[in-house]
Amino acid sequence: RDLRIAEHIVSTNKQFGYPKMFDTNYNKNNSELVLQIANTLSTINRRFTVALQSTHEPTLNAIKRGNLETSDLDKILEIAKRNNVVVSTELITGLPLETLDSWKQGIATMIEKGIMVEALPLSLLENSEMNDPAYRAKYGMITHNSELPFGSYVPEYQDVITSTSTISHEEMAELWMFNWITNSMHSLGFTHLISRYMHDHHGISYIDFYDQLLTDFRND
């Protein structure tokens, strides 16, 4: 049924020009059928998203989450490549037990696999387990009440993580700078071929490449 719905949406776009863009959330346990749907929507859908949040095992245990096995993820990437589907994932900054080093390694792993990364800040919602005072104290979660950047009619605010027991405020700032350099330079295509060449032929890790590039930008 879902595949037929996707086909109808694309048909409507071709006939009337609308919807111009279509975005959706996909089943976490992605199957070949899900990728067929993503391929069908590829002309109007931004990309196919694999749900991960973090690649750091202690963090996944702390948030009671299990990711896809590496073999399953690789299978999805193989099917996606065969169907010309761009794959992305969303990683969440500020999760319990995540460190600056583990975060950078997670970004590097995604780059190696050809997965686009969208980094999102962890916000603590009312009545969520993470917002429980005991949970926040356990993982040293410090927040800042920040206005949401979207919503032009009524101002909305959220408690965004600025530091935890395993990542300081300064390291969090550095983490976001690493997100900026990898997203703006690698994901947008300015340095992805250069970094891949240096990685494959000279053994320079993606972390070292983008750390050095960020240093050069700061010193320029």
Image (spheres, rainbow, N blue to C red):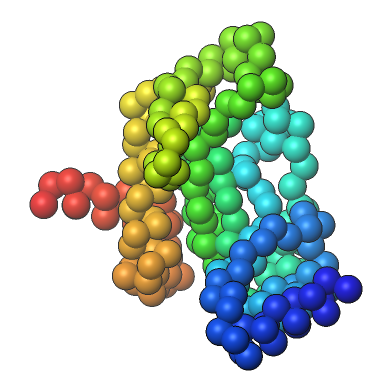
* Looking at the image, residue 101 lies above or below residue 207: above
User: Which residue is at a point 51% across and 53% down the rendered structure image?
Assistant: 118
User: Horizontally, is 150 left or right of 56 in the view?
Assistant: left
User: Horizontally, is 27 left or right of 137 in the view?
Assistant: right
* Looking at the image, residue 131 lies above or below residue 108: above
User: Which residue is at a point 19% across and 52% down the rendered structure image?
Assistant: 216
For residue 19, say whether it is visible.
yes
- Horizontal and vertical percent for residue 175? 40, 39
For residue 165, say whether it is visible.
no
Query: Which of the image's four quarters has the N terminus?
Result: bottom right
Q: Nearer the viewer, residue 2 or 14?
A: 14
- Horizontal and vertical percent for residue 60? 69, 36
- Horizontal and vertical percent for residue 213? 26, 55
Extreme residue in the left direction: 220
User: Which residue is at a point 33% across and 53% down the rendered structure image?
Assistant: 181
Q: Nearer the viewer, residue 1 or 124?
A: 1
Please identify the quarter of the rendering in which residue 10 is found.
bottom right
Please identify the quarter of the rendering in which residue 39 is found.
bottom right
- Horizontal and vertical percent for residue 140? 54, 14
